[in-house]
Image (spheres, rainbow, N blue to C red):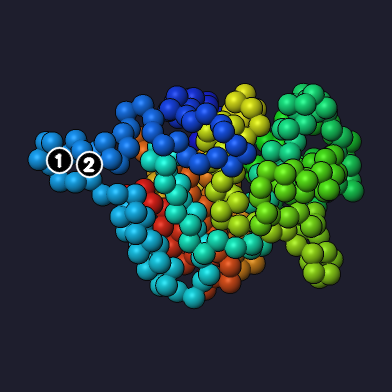
Amino acid sequence: MKKSKGICAALLLTALSLPLAACAADVPAAPASSAGVTDTAAQTAAAGQQGAAVQPTKEDRNAALAAHIEALSNGDSTHYEVFVAYPLENREYVYQSAPMRSASMIKVFILATAMERVKAGTLALDQTLTLHSSDKVGGAGVIAGYASGTELSLDTVMRFMITESDNTATNMMIDLLGMDAINAYIQQHGYHDTSLQRKMMDSAAVAAGRDNYTSAADLGHFFVTLYNRCCVSPELDDVMLGYLAGQTDTECFPAAMPGVMIAHKTGELGGLYDDGGIIYQEGRPFIMVGMTEHYSGRGTAIRTLQAMLRAAAEE
């Protein structure tokens, strides 16, 4: 079920009122502590003083999560890769992260590249782009149905690229920014498993051996910086979070945790389904990316990713 823009905006504003870490690097570690959250040593000392049970360590909790994720992954022949981070606990867990076909997950890096240009003043959210017939491609999206010559704001094109995973919008952004510039942004920010080698729906490029790649860890660290609002700037990160919160593909993560605000991106190609983003669980927000390849079945992959998400929410 799609959320209204008003509800999304209100929920996102509430979510962003959570404690956020200062940005120390392009791909920072999650904050060691936050308001209302003590470190493990302090928790253990307090528990000992009160005669309560000792709190599990980060290592204990990661081991429990690993056992759960691995058991779910081993349940079928699908290849799964998972990243989970808990910013308020200075904890992350990675399961089998390596470069994989990115599908539409690559679009978050295109978005961030564009926002860097907006920050620099060489692009503006209200500038217009003209839709040409040569821009139009199939697959996901709505812009291809618009008349050639339609003028769209940069904000609209980027919003559709994320909320609708619009392939025509994405190709317009690749033309505007340049593939080399997008890859430069990716590498400069430490996302070394990620590369953009083709436009959307370019079957000739795929046949020639060129494809787009990323990893669960690269995506996870991207979402960590966005959660901390130190990806581009706090103001522009809020814009990106708004796009991600308006994601219209709610089949996987949102269906697994109904009522929880999730700012995320999905990706899908033959044999794979991915979902990843920020889960604003009350009192314990976390970042999760789940990627699949060679799935045994689309429904099985989605149900397994949902089970992994629920495990991450509980461990």
Residue 21 seen in this snapshot? yes
Q: Hey, which quadrant is residue 214 in on the image?
A: bottom right
| C-beta proximity under 8 Å, tags 2 and 1 | yes
Q: Residue 197, position in %: x, y?
A: 79, 57
At 51% from the left and 71% from the top, the residue drawn is 78
Residue 8 visible, this orientation = no
Distance (Cα) linking label 2 and label 1: 6 Å
Q: At numbered mark 2, what does the secondary structure look like: helix, strand or loop?
A: helix
In the rendered image, which residue does mark 1 sit on? 48
Query: Callout 2: few (<14), some (14-19), or many (20+) C-alpha neighbours within 10 Å?
Result: some
Q: Secondary structure at mark 1?
A: helix
Identified by mark 2, the residue type is Thr
Name the residue located 47 percent from the left edge and 40 percent from the top edge: 30
Q: Position of residue 221 (x, y in %)?
A: 56, 46
Residue lying farthest bottom? 77
Q: Quarter of the image holding residue 5?
A: top right
Question: In this rendering, is residue 303 above or below 28?
Answer: below
Question: Which residue was labeled with disc 2?
Answer: 44
- For the residue pair 282 and 42, the one nearer the viewer reads as 42
Residue at point 81%, 60% (across, down): 202
